[in-house]
Amino acid sequence: MITPTADQIAKTKKSIENYYISWISYPYKREGVAPFYQMHEPGESIRGTVMIFHGFSAKPMQMFLVGDYLFRNGFNIYQIPLAGHAFIPPDSYWPQVDLKPEFRDPLRDEVRKDAVLDLFLSNRDNKSQGQFQRLTTFQKMALIGRIIKMAPQLLDMALAIERPNDPDFDRYFTSSHMNYLTDAQERLAELDAMPGPIYTLGLSVGGAVALGLAASRPDRIKKVVAYAPLLEVSNEINERYINLTGPLDLREFSWEQNVSFPVGCLTAANRFGAFVRSDKNREALEKIPTFLVLTENEDAADLKTNQRFFDQLGGKDKGHHYYLYPASDLVPHPMVDPTEVSQGMTNRFWKSLYQETFRFLTTGEVDADNMSNLEEAPDLPPMPTYS
């Protein structure tokens, strides 16, 4: 435990509030995506400060309950919008991978010579969220095949995205995927005046950011909790789909936020996940205790990639922990929010998830038997009542 001084708290609040002021004064801000903090008063001892990153296309409030639980039990909390997500339109602000114009424009023209593809792309562009439907795996496969038939050179470009360190990537593409890291580093700098350990916690792309930030600052980040981190999108069909259609500016919708975004934003999230998995970052993370929470009902992050990443970190012998919700527990990818419905599922075990997150941050241990327990563990702080 450490007791920050009034001056240290004031300096930290001022740094965060300067970021908030820049958001609130910006004409293209996205409503409800403000950074916010919960900090204990001067003279109160704290366990450290937790930086919390929400999932792709979501808002910081997605993570409010877990943050509030940790705050009530001794942590300072900083809830942070993912890079660019505090602003709209996503086309201008969210990290994305784009084909350079000299490649993009002729490719789009070539693909739209196919009357079927032209109609499909036009329909996707003009749909409102109420009319929008996500593509099935079979539809994605059919779309991939038809696009490659019309523009076979696009496959080589997609492979340049998928292969690590492919020299052709910079030839074909511009990418802002590293904004996920640089933005998180700027938020970390706002905590320079705050003493004590810093922890990172995130969901999905936010989980990848939590890991990537820790790998870049092992001197400052002491532990990481990553819920279903998006280190690679689930299955090869989805990956090929986003890497082929992203450069064509096909659009997707966020179900929760009524925001349409280019598929290239998903391409950037996937590429950032590959960066986090790089040897350099993995070696840095071997020395930072991590807690990965996964689910067999995964529909966004590739489960096998996450499991392999955990094994490469060295497992429990190196201070790392891992829990996999079985399919029968009906826990979806957005597992942190008990009110969020995905694939018809919500996480009924959220209380034990929060408690074990607290246990890990304070002791470095995890009680796997408690993770699928509907009752609260008596040896951990109880959950407050949330209406």
Image: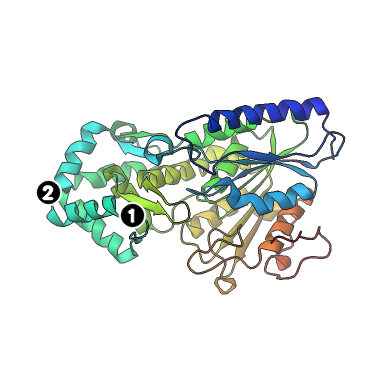
Q: Earlier in the sequence, mark 2 or mark 1?
A: 2
Residue 320 seen in the current view: no
Q: Measuring 50% from the left and 39% from the top, which residue is drawn there? A: 86
Q: Give the quadrant of residue 136.
A: bottom left
Amino acid found under the numbered disc labelled 1 = Ser
Residue 366 lies in what quarter of the image?
Answer: bottom right
Mark 2 residue type = Lys
SS at mark 1 in the image: loop
Give the x, y percent position of residue 24. Answer: 55, 33
Q: How many marks?
A: 2
Q: CA distance from mark 2 to mark 1?
A: 25 Å
| Rendered location of residue 335, percent (x, y) | 58, 60
> What is the quadrant of the N terminus in the image?
top right
Q: Is residue 357 left or right of residue 116?
A: right
Of circles 2 and 1, the one toward us is 1
Q: Which residue is mark 1?
A: 128
Asked if residue 236 is positioned above or below residue 186 in the image, the reply reads below
Which residue does the image show at 69% across and 65% down from the upper left? 371
